[in-house]
Amino acid sequence: GAVVSQHPSWVICKSGTSVKIECRSLDFQATTMFWYRQFPKQSLMLMATSNEGSKATYEQGVEKDKFLINHASLTLSTLTVTSAHPEDSSFYICSARSGVVQETQYFGPGTRLLVL
Amino acid sequence: LAKTTQPISMDSYEGQEVNITCSHNNIATNDYITWYQQFPSQGPRFIIQGYKTKVTNEVASLFIPADRKSSTLSLPRVSLSDTAVYYCLVYGGATNKLIFGTGTLLAVQP
């Protein structure tokens, strides 16, 4: 299957700082990328959907000013957690899909964020 | 949005066939059914996708009845390494995004 990478795989930061997470589709062009968050022993929660070249669509309850998403190219999307706080500590996972809606969505390995 | 319901957990032994059933009563005409596997601290891994009847690949089979209100993921001869959470999702018609349910924690014992 297609490969999606994330960088970094883990990050520790101080409260109040901003953290950027990159998501790349390595061998296909991703017209749509998704960002999820997963807390321990819970399911994945969709945060936002981004289409290349347009603004991201955020799920209800997700602060768009706190979680900045940029999908500047067909192979790269970034999630910036601004002014991170301990409650933002979580496992962030991106996914990417090419072409039509029914095509398979591939997930990255995830990024573990710990805010101290 | 089509909502899926699956058992919270299942137990099995090595070498057995495991069938995980998922209910999706509100599936839309254009929705596809997709299953993912997730290990701790990893992103979900695509297993199989189907629309109707039966789909088989090198790791699993997916059975979908004519009314498409449920589906069954079949894992032949599981091993310890198949211990993971399995998610059933429907998407493609009414929605273009994958919404995850609780998933099924499959525990394979020796």
Image: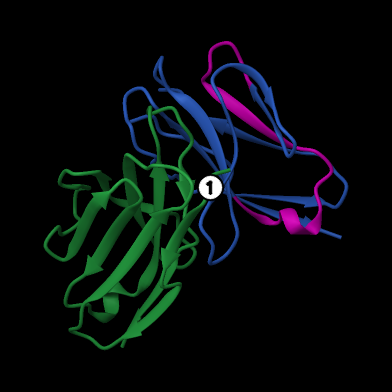
Chain colours: A green, B blue
Left or right of residue A26: residue B13: right
- Residue appearing at x 46%, y 23% in the figure: B25
Residue B70 is covered by the magenta coloring: yes
Q: Which residue is mark 1?
A: B103
In the image, which residues are magenta?
Answer: B64-85
Q: Is residue A92 above or below residue A95?
A: below
Q: Nearer the viewer, residue B17 or B51?
A: B51
Residue B1 is covered by the magenta coloring: no
Quadrant of the snapshot with the C terminus of chain A? bottom left
> Can residue A88 be seen at all in this image of the molecule?
yes
Left or right of residue B55: residue A110: left
In the rendered image, residue B56, in percent from the top left (x then y), is placed at: 71, 27
Q: Is residue A92 above or below residue B32?
A: below
- Residue appearing at x 15%, y 59% in the figure: A63
Quadrant of the snapshot with the N terminus of chain A? top right
Q: Which of the 4 image quarters holds residue B58?
A: top right
Q: Amino acid at mark 1?
A: Gly
Q: Chain of mark 1?
A: B
In the rendered image, residue B74, in percent from the top left (x then y), is placed at: 72, 34
Q: Is residue A116 above or below residue B36?
A: below
